[in-house]
Image: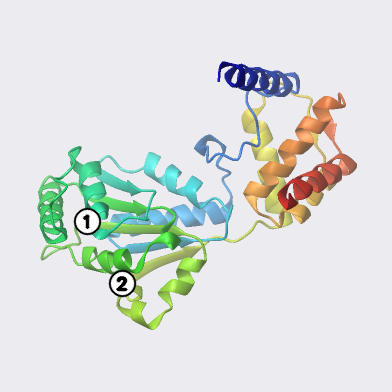
Amino acid sequence: MNAVCEMTADLSDHLEACYGSLGFATAPFRITPDTDFLVPQHQYREAISHLRFGLATGSFTLLTGDVGLGKTLLCRYLMQHLPANVRTAYIFNPQQNYAEFLCSILYDLTGKMPRNDASSALLHDALFTVLAKLAGRGRRVALVIDEAHCLPPELLEGLRLLSNLETGKRKLLSLLLVGQNELEQTLQAPEMRALRQRISVWHRLRPFTWRESADYIRHRLQVARIAEGFEITGPACLLAHRHAGGVPRRLNQICDRALLAAYSSRRTRVHAGLMQRAAREVTALEAL
């Protein structure tokens, strides 16, 4: 175990030295959803505006998109920049039964875990009480569900019930579902009609255009940069876009591979040929 830890530490130190020698304080193309790297592009600004509107109005809001387009990144950015009067409950594991789901929400809002033997009906009533108290103090509550395409039918029906929690003047809970495109297909089923009719804000992310991909790559380089000198050429950016299909996560994987190749060959520029090789290597690894 100690040997594995030492190897991991050595690899981490080596990678830090690699990026540092290229003029970066950190890896520019990590695939983790780091909000410091959020690129201020039109479609992301538009998505954030839709999400903020949904939360502000107590709407049932949906954000969908294919794998790797930045849904979780946008979700985390939104939660980091909410108004002071907004409380959130964040569900990242939708594979629960309804009682467990309600317990998770109550824990996020109160810091206390309900009794294990509490029924769904009692938990539902307890949640209404908590929401009503928060509303009385001028607080809004947003329930954010990531990976919502994995929601089982029981929880989808539960969301319909939660969307009914309201006073005579306003909704007590804003609902935000973040998931892959399969969620849209699920909601098109006839038995989902009642839930689908409650969705008032719906935004779908799309892959980047080639120009957006180039802007994305250069933005991440600039955010991570501490010294001038290293660059990825325009033709290399275009090649990365083609191989990634405009998907940010794949752009990160390909460009990171290209940076490591540039480091190993002592280059300060990623040209088209180097990017082409990096893309092929990433594709080959995925095929294993």
- Give the image location of residue 132, x and y in percent: 11, 53
Which picture quadrant has residue 171? bottom left
Rendered view: 17 above or below 115: above
- Give the image location of residue 24, x and y in percent: 68, 24
Element carrying mark 2: loop
**In this rendering, does residue 123 appear at all?**
yes
Q: Nearest the camera: 115 or 103? A: 115
- At a point 52% along the width and 66% down the height, the residue shown is 181
Q: Residue furthest right?
A: 273
Q: Residues within 10 Å of mark 2 (few under 14, many from 20)?
A: some
- At a point 9% along the width and 52% down the height, the residue shown is 129
Which residue lies under the disc numbered 2?
A: 198
Q: Residues within 10 Å of mark 1 (few under 14, many from 20)?
A: many
Element carrying mark 1: helix
Which residue lies under the disc numbered 1?
A: 99
Disc 2 from disc 1: Cα separation: 22 Å
The amino acid on which the numbered mark 2 sits, given as a three-letter code, is Arg
**In this rendering, does residue 85 appear at all?**
no
Q: Nearest the camera: 10 or 202? A: 10
Question: Of the residues tagged 2 and 1, which is closer to the observer?
Answer: 1
- Give the image location of residue 231, x and y in percent: 79, 33
- At a point 62% along the width and 22% down the height, the residue shown is 8
The amino acid on which the numbered mark 1 sits, given as a three-letter code, is Ala
